[in-house]
Image: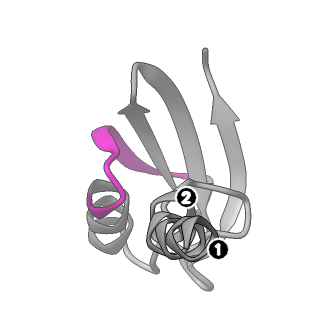
Amino acid sequence: MRKIALITLMAFAAPAFAADLTADTMLGKTMDEVKTTLTDMGYEVRKAEMEDGNIEVYFVKDGKMGEVYVAPETGAITKLDWKN
């Protein structure tokens, strides 16, 4: 019985872990799409701008600051830096 409860709990917890930002995450092809996706994932977007043809976004989540670059042609992350 406990095994079934544990498996069920893990199945419901999996989507929470899927919301983490990784180099494989597709964020969107426009600045608004990227900002919306990050906000929906629980990130606070601090600044967004175009730099060298990429969408550059500074964000904060759980007290950790980061910066992500997204290729507007594909919506894929080209660079991801965590500041602290």
Residue 34 point in image, percent of width and height: 39, 66
Let me know if residue 5 is in the magenta part.
no
- Give the magenta range: 40-51
Report how far apart the C-alphas of labels 2 and 1 lie in the structure. 19 Å
Residue at image x 58%, y 54%? 21
Residue denoted by label 2: 17
Label placed on residue 67:
none
Left or right side of 79 for 53: left
Residue at image x 48%, y 66%? 9
Left or right side of 14 for 30: left
Q: Magenta stretch mostly in which secondary structure?
A: strand
Quarter of the figure that contains the C terminus: top right
Residue denoted by label 1: 76
Q: Secondary structure at mark 2?
A: helix
Residue 79 point in image, percent of width and height: 72, 50
Residue type at tag 1 = Ala
Q: Is residue 49 above or below residue 84?
A: below
Residue at image x 34%, y 45%? 43
Residue type at tag 2 = Phe
